[in-house]
Image (cartoon, rainbow, N blue to C red):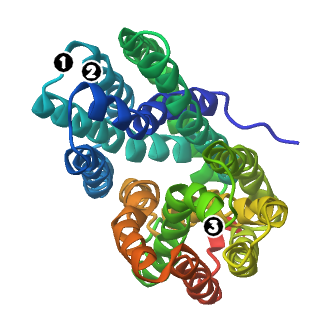
Amino acid sequence: MKKINPYVYLFAMGHFAADWAQGAWPALLPYFISVCHLNYQEAGSLIFANMLLASITQPFFGYYSDKISKPWFVPAGPILCGLSLAVIPFTTNYWIIFVCSMLCGLGSAVFHPEAALMVNKISGNLKGQALGTFSVGGNTGFAIGPLVVGLFAYKYDIHGLLLFGIVNLILAALMYVKMGAILGQAKDVAAAEVKNSIFGERKNDWGAFSKLSVIIFARSLGFTICNSFIPIYWINVLGTSPATGSMALTILFALGAVITFLGGVLADRFGFIKILRSALIVMVPAMFFLTHSTDVTTATLLLLPAAYALFGCYSPIVVLGQTYLGKNVGFASGVTMGLGTTIGGIMAPLVGRAADYWGIATALQILWIAALAAAIFSFLLPRPKELE
C-alpha cells in the first residue's frame, strides 16, 4: 500500500490548530454571558461574525492563492486563531471580544485554502487519502477545542486559554521552518505529474463545479443542522438528559473523524464519484429514519449511517472541486472547505424558527429532502479523467 507524503500530517496538525480554536468559541458563550454580562443576542452575534467572516472570505483567499501563492498564509492562520483566544482572559469588553471572534474567523479563512492547495500539490495520486488525513486534523480540533475550553472556563482558570496561543504558535513555527522543503517536494510532484501525463493541461469545468456546489451546500446543511439540533432532538423528542444529548453529538463526531479518513482511502481505491454517490444515497434513508425515530437506541444506532453520509463524502467533495477547477484549486478549496462548510449556518436560524412553529421533528425533515437533491445531482457529475 502506497504511503502519503509525511508532510500531510504536518498540515493535519495545522488544521487541528485552526479548528480547535474555531470549535472553542461556541463553548465560550456561557462564560461570556455570565462573566462578561452579555445577552443572548450579543453572544450569538459573536458566532455569527466568526462564521460569516470565515466562510465568505475563504474563497477570496483561495482565489488570491491561485494567482499568487502565499505559503506564509499556512502558519499565519493558526497564529491568528490562537491569538484570538489568548486575549480573552484579559478582557471583558464586548467589542474586544467581538474583534477576537472575527480574528479567529479570519485566521481560519487564511489557513484553509492555501493549506488545502499545498496538500493537493504534494499528495500525487493519493489525493483522497491525503485530504482525508488533512480533514481528520480539523475534525479532531472541533471535537477537542470545546472540551479544553470547558476545563479552563468552567472548572479551572480562564487564563488556561493561553494554551491555545502557545500550541498554535509552536505548530505554526514548525510549519514555517519546514515550508522550504514542502515547496521543493511540491515542485517534484508537479514535475512527475507532467512527465507521467497524470493531469496534462489543467482546465476549469464550471458547469461540473456548479452541480457539485448543490451537493456542497446540501452536505453543509446536514452537517450544521445535525451539529446544532441533535442534542435538542435527543432531549425534546427522545426524552433524554442534556448529557445524553451531548454524548450523541460526541458519538457522531468521533465516528466522523474515522470515516473522514476512510472516505479518502476508499475514494482513492474505488473512485471519488462512487464514494460520493454511496454516501449521499445512504444520507437519504439515514436522515429520514433518524428524524422519525422515537427510540433513543434506534436513533443512536442510526448515527453510524448518518456519520458515513456526512463525513464519507467530504474528501471526495474537496478533491472533485479541486479537479473540476484545475486552474483555480485554491478557490475551489475555499468554497468546498470554507463557504461550503459554514453556509449551512445561514439556514440554522430558519430551521430553528420552523421548529418553533411546527416542532423540532418536523423542521428536521429538511435533512433528508436536501440529501435527496444532493443524491440526484451526484448522478449528473462528470467523471474527471484525472481521477480515473
Quarter in which the C terminus is drawn: bottom right
Q: CA distance from mark 1 to mark 2?
A: 6 Å
Identify which amino acid the numbered label 1 is placed on: Thr
Q: Residues within 10 Å of mark 1 (few under 14, many from 20)?
A: few
The residue under label 1 is 91
User: What residue is drawn where x is 54% and y is 48%?
Assistant: 120
Please provide percent x and percent y for residue 284: 69, 81
Which element type, helix, strand or loop, lies under badge 1? loop
Instruction: Judge from the rendering whether residue 2 lies leftward or rightward of residue 272; answer left or right.
Output: right
The residue identified by callout 2 is 88
Give the alpha-carbon distance from disc 3 to disc 2, as whole Å: 47 Å
Foreground pick, 298 / 130: 298
Residue 307 appears at what percent x and percent y?
Answer: 71, 59
The label nearer to you, 3 versus 2, is: 2
User: Which percent across, then down, holds residue 221?
Assistant: 49, 69
Mark 2 neighbour density, 10 Å: few (under 14) some (14–19) many (20 or more): many
Q: Which mark is residue 290?
A: none
Tell me the quarter of the image containing the N terminus: top right
Q: Is residue 339 visible?
A: yes
